[in-house]
Image: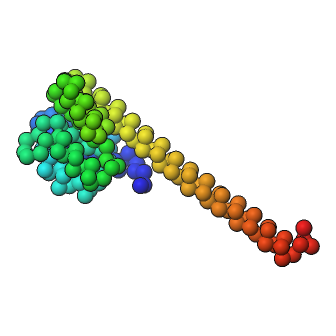
Amino acid sequence: MKMKSKKNISIFLVEDDPVYASTLKYDLSSDHSYKIKVFSSGEECVKKLYLNPDIILLDYYLNGKLNGIDVLRKIQRFGENIQVIFLSGQEKIEVAANVMKHGAYDYVVKNETAFIRVKGLIKKILNYNKLVKENRDFKKFQAFILFVLLIGIVSVVVINYMHPELF
């Protein structure tokens, strides 16, 4: 998976309250150049998963046939690299525990600190993804170095066998 620059980070915001959605989108866009697509239903989001968002901000209660957990399940079937942060007005610990049990990255209560928490979680996800990519690149580099060393050793052994007078 190629690491994207912050300008290429794609975020889906699935929120059926248009005022909350536009305010959160504006707040996120004011700090970064994220590509944010807003959906008012889970069904709309699921139809656009082929666009491969990096992060999905998902309301727990949604208008339509799919609730947040239903959408999360469909997202997980689509791709495991998509991180989902739930947003909800529910302050019940059972709700938070339920979404985490189903594989959400985190759960944010819609309160006065929600936007700050969402920004912090996005930053954590992007930093984690960057570390994963760096680790993968380092392992590829290690494998390349080992391959070059192996070729060198084999070459020396072959030359020694064919021309022992050189050693």
Q: Quadrant of the C terminus?
A: bottom right
Q: How many marks on residues?
A: 0
Outermost residue on the right side: it is 165
> Residue 115 sits in which quadrant?
top left
Residue plotted at (28% across, 35% down): 100
Whole-percent x and y of residue 53?
Answer: 29, 50
Q: Quadrant of the N terminus?
A: bottom left
Looking at the image, residue 78 sits to the left or right of residue 1; the answer is: left
Looking at the image, residue 21 sits to the left or right of residue 159; the answer is: left
Q: Is residue 81 visible?
A: yes
Colouring style: rainbow
Looking at the image, residue 112 sits to the left or right of residue 32; the answer is: left
Q: Is residue 34 visible?
A: no
Above/below status of 83 relative to 153? above
Whole-percent x and y of residue 145?
Answer: 65, 57
Whole-percent x and y of residue 6?
Answer: 38, 45
Q: Nearer the viewer, residue 82 or 94?
A: 94
Whole-percent x and y of residue 60?
Answer: 17, 36
> Residue 13 sits in which quadrant?
top left
> Residue 11 sits in which quadrant?
top left
Looking at the image, residue 1 sits to the left or right of residue 80; the answer is: right
Residue plotted at (56% across, 50% down): 138
Outermost residue on the bottom side: it is 162
Above/below status of 98 relative to 92? below
Residue plotted at (13% across, 41% down): 67
Residue plotted at (43% across, 40% down): 128
Q: Nearer the viewer, residue 77 or 23?
A: 77
